[in-house]
Amino acid sequence: MLAQVVGILLIPVVTRIYSPPEYFGVAQLFLSIAAVLVVISSLSYHYVIMLPEKDEDSMNVSVLCIVCILGTSAAAGAVFIGFSDWLGAVFETPMIADYLIWLPVFITFNSLFVILNRWLSRKARYGVLSKGIVVNSVSTRVLQIGGG
């Protein structure tokens, strides 16, 4: 709940910083592209982390997820950075080309956040998990404000 409240309270600040609607649109386009790639980055193996009876098997699945994330991030980086100008033309937002270099970093960290959430849920560390969600929400808004 705290993460949602912080996110909602900082929305007016974010919308003031991105005063021309184009800048806010570029930020939302970036986040939309990243959200799709974060979902597929671990190839859905993150759902398996909770299933094994032994922690060792679950840790092996977590390592597999990290390998998939790094591979997906590298491939996305090659495509999105290599064709950034073309993608800017396709999305009719040429300004996005300058920000696509950050896409692999964003995908990697957000996907690792998902993996760690699954691992902490498996270990029933809900206090640490809730603190992480708050930190993620606050840091996302701070980066949006700082990036503006």
Image (cartoon, rainbow, N blue to C red):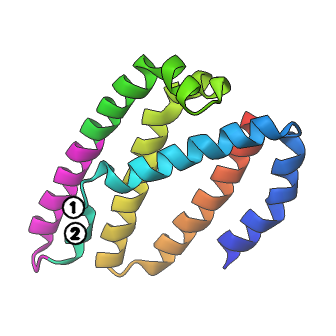
Name the amino acid type tagged 1: Tyr
Range covered by the magenta-colored residues:
52-69
Secondary structure under the numbered disc 2 in the rendered image: helix
- Label number found at residue 146: none
Residue drawn at x 33%, y 69% as measured from the top left: 118
Q: Nearer the viewer, residue 98 or 4?
A: 98
Q: Position of residue 43 (x, y in %)?
A: 24, 54
Q: Is residue 8 left or right of residue 129?
A: right
- In terms of secondary structure, where does tag 1 sit? helix
Residue 56 inside the magenta-drawn segment: yes
Residue 52: x and y, percent?
12, 76
Q: Residue at 56% across / 69% down in the picture?
A: 131
* Secondary structure, magenta segment, majority class: helix
Identity, as a three-letter code, of the amino acid under mark 2: Ile
* Residue at x 72% of width, y 35% of height: 147
In this figure, which residue is indicated by the disc labeled 2? 49
Q: Is residue 55 above or below residue 53?
A: above
Considering the image in quadrants, where does the N terminus appear? bottom right
Residue identified by numbered label 1: 45
48 in magenta:
no
Q: Distance from label 2 to label 1 (Cα)?
A: 7 Å
Is 98 positioned to the left or the right of 120 in the image?
Answer: right
